[in-house]
Amino acid sequence: MDVQGIEALRQSLNQWPAPDNNGLGDPVLAMTAAAGIASATPRSQVHYAGENHDTTAQDNLQLTSGAAMHLQAGKGLSAFAQDAGISAIANRGKVLVQAQEDDIALNAQKNLHVSAVEGEVVITAPTIRLVADDGSYIKIGGGVEIGSQGKVTVHASEHDWIGPKTDSAAIPSFGRDPAAQQVTFHYPGHSEQSPRAAADHSYEIKLEDGSLVKGMTNADGLTERVQREMMHQAQVSALRSGTPKGGAQ
């Protein structure tokens, strides 16, 4: 967990000068109220942080949305509960969990239960292995192999040994698109009805890996598409180089 941002704020607040001191502290905005703080608007609210955004509650933290809620992260999501467990429930609609480039691990100290009230449970892979603690196993793939050092018991009213037969199941395919973005430059007053794109404008894009992308915006004010295998934070700068087209600065 990255605590550098909140620790820097804490240090700035601790070093604030006293009210009767003419010294200057860091330009920090702080709000406090003994009985609570309420912030409301019938329209939208935007909270932006150039570094970290920390939200902490000594008791409960509750987030509610009347429509959809989206969580997006460039470098992973983590959820941990010390006590009382974790619940993820879809009252209506499908639950989709994918690991598009790595493994999914489901581990339990006690039981692992998989069930379907209607329909079926389908497990598909090039090879499927069921292995018990004593080493007994069933291996499916390239035929069926059963092994055990103990007794194998099969209960059935009839046993039919007939010719070969196979089945099939759909397997998802995952694309691997790299992270790629473009930036649009425009002048104040820009809108779809009255565009004021900053065409032929010099720019620099500095990525967190230290690489630097330089260029000129096209006729629509777009930079080149910056593409990397992993998502990066970027610092975008517009450079003055003569009088660019599209409008006066």
Image (spheres, grey):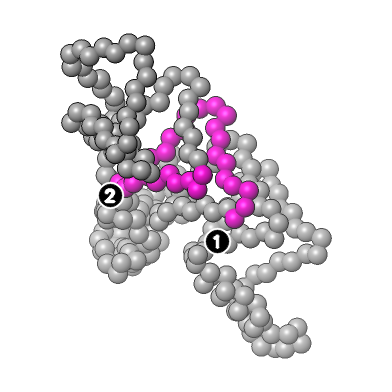
* Alpha-carbon span between mark 2 and mark 1: 26 Å
Name the residue type under label 2.
Pro
Magenta-highlighted stretch: main secondary structure?
loop
Q: In the image shown, does 189 or 81 lie closer to the viewer?
A: 81
Q: Which mark is residue 4?
A: none
Instruction: Give me the residue at 29% from left, 26% from top.
Output: 170
Residue density around tag 2, few if under 14, some if 14–19, many if 20 or more, within 10 Å: few
Q: Which mark is residue 53?
A: 1
Residue 238 visible in the displayed image: no
SS type, badge 2 = loop
Say which element carries label 1: loop
Image location (x, y in percent) of residue 78: 48, 53
User: Which quadrant holds residue 216?
Assistant: bottom left
Rendered location of residue 30, percent (x, y): 68, 69
Who is closer to the viewer here, 249 or 66? Answer: 66
Residue farthest to the front, as pictured: 151
Q: Residue at x 36, y 43 (%)?
A: 134
Q: Residue at x 23, y 32 (%)?
A: 145
Q: Residue at x 48, y 28 (%)?
A: 115
- The residue that disc 2 covers is 178
- Which amino acid type is marked by label 1? His
Judge whether residue 60 is colored magenta.
no
Residue stretch in magenta = 82-110
Q: Is 112 on the left or on the right of 144, as rendered?
A: right
In primary-sequence order, the first of circles 2 and 1 is 1
Residue 94 part of the magenta segment: yes
Query: Picture coordinates of residue 125 (x, y %)?
Result: 28, 34
Disc 1 packing (10 Å; few <14; some 14–19; many ≥20): few
In which quadrant of the rendered image does the C terminus lie?
A: bottom left
